[in-house]
Amino acid sequence: LSDRRSPRRLVLAVEDDADIARALGVLLERNDFEVLLASDGRDGLRLFHQCRPQLVILDVGLPEMDGWTLLERVRELSDAPVLMLTARDGETDKVRGLRAGADDYLTKPFGNAELVARVEALLRRAPDGAIRGGVPGTAVAEAGTERLGGSQGSGRGGQLRIGAVRIDPEAHIVEVDGREVDLTPTEYRLLQALARHPGQVLSNEQLLRLAWQDPTATGPDRVKFTVLRLRRKLGWAEAGASPLETVRGFGYRLRT
Ligand code: CA
C-alpha cells in the first residue's frame, strides 16, 4: 500500500554502533527500503537536509550531536516520522523522546520483524510526511468536516472554533489567534478525532485507533505525550483552563 503512495521509501538511520547500523541497513534494504546510514548526529542532520528521507531511525546516544538535539532539529524542519532507539533501561529516554516529538520508540535489542513492522506502520500513518499544503482529505478529515460544520452551524464551511483556536479541516490548517500552528500529522489527527466528538470522552484505545490509525498500537503513553504537545502548541497547557481535559484513568475529552 505504501509503495503506491510513495514510491521512494527512503529511511535515514543514525546509529554509531557499526554492527547495529549494518544490521539495520541489511534488514531495511531486504524489505524494499532505500537506506542512508549516518554514524553521528552531525552527519545525520546533514543527510536529512540533503536527502529529505520519509522516516528517521534515531539512536539516543550519538557522538558529535546527540539524538535529542538531532530530534529537535529534525522537528524544526519536518514532520517526518521519527523512531527512537533507546537503551534497555531507558524508561526516561522513552518518555523524553515521546515528549520531544518522536513518533515511536524501540528498545534495544529489538527484533527484526518488530522494527520493520514499526517502520511500516509509521509510514502508513504519515504517507507524505507532512500535513499542510497537501494531503487532500484523509478519511478522518472528511468525516470531521461534515460533523464540525453540522455541529457549529456557522463560519466558513466546516471550520471549528474552540476559544482562540480555529481548525480548518479542508485546508488542514490550525490557527491560534490567527497564527498558523505547526502540528505533526499525529497531533492533527488527534485534535480532529477529539473535535469530531465534542464533549465526549474518548478512551486511549479509541484515540489510538482514530488518530494513529494503527489497530496494533498500544500504550497510553503515546496518547499522553501527544496530548501534552498539542496542549502546549495550542496554548492549552494551563491546568484547569484547558478545553482538552484529562479524564483520569480513562481518556480525554474536548469541550467546545
Ligand atoms: Ca549509540
Image: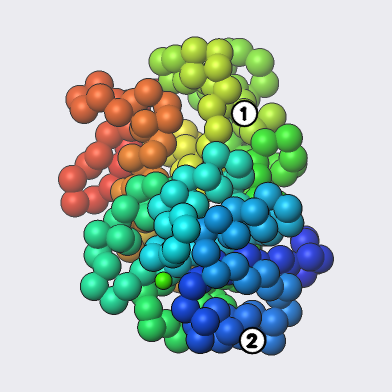
- Residue 40 visible, this orientation: yes
Residue type at mark 1?
Ile
Dot label at residue 205: none
What residue sits 73% from the left and 67% below the top?
9
Mark-to-mark CA distance, 2 and 1: 39 Å
Left or right of 97? Residue 8 is: right
Quadrant of picture, ligand 1: bottom left
Residue placed under numbered mark 1 in the picture: 173
Residue 22: x %, y % from top left: 58, 84
What residue sits 62% from the left and 28% below the top?
173
Residue 203 vs residue 54, the one in the foreground: 54
Q: Earlier in the sequence, mark 2 or mark 1?
A: 2
Residue 95: x %, y % from top left: 29, 56
Q: Could you tell me which quadrant the C terminus lies in?
A: top left
Left or right of 213? Residue 104 is: left
Residue 202: x %, y % from top left: 35, 46
What residue sits 38% from the left and 83% below the top?
109
- Is the residue 95 above or below the residue 231 in the image? below
Residue 197: x %, y % from top left: 43, 37
Is disc 2 in contact with disc 1, using a CB cutoff of under 8 Å?
A: no
Frontmost of labels 2 and 1 is 2
Residue 108 vs residue 70, the one in the foreground: 70
Ligand 1 within 8 Å of the CB at mark 2: no
Residue type at mark 2?
Val
Q: Estimate how packed mark 1 is, as few (under 14), some (14 to 19) or many (20 or more) residues with alpha carbons within 10 Å.
A: some
What residue sits 40% from the left and 63% below the top?
60
Residue placed under numbered mark 2 in the picture: 26
Secondary structure of the residue carrying tag 2 is: helix
- Is the residue 176 above or below the residue 125 in the image? above
Residue 188 vs residue 144, the one in the foreground: 188
Secondary structure of the residue carrying tag 1 is: strand
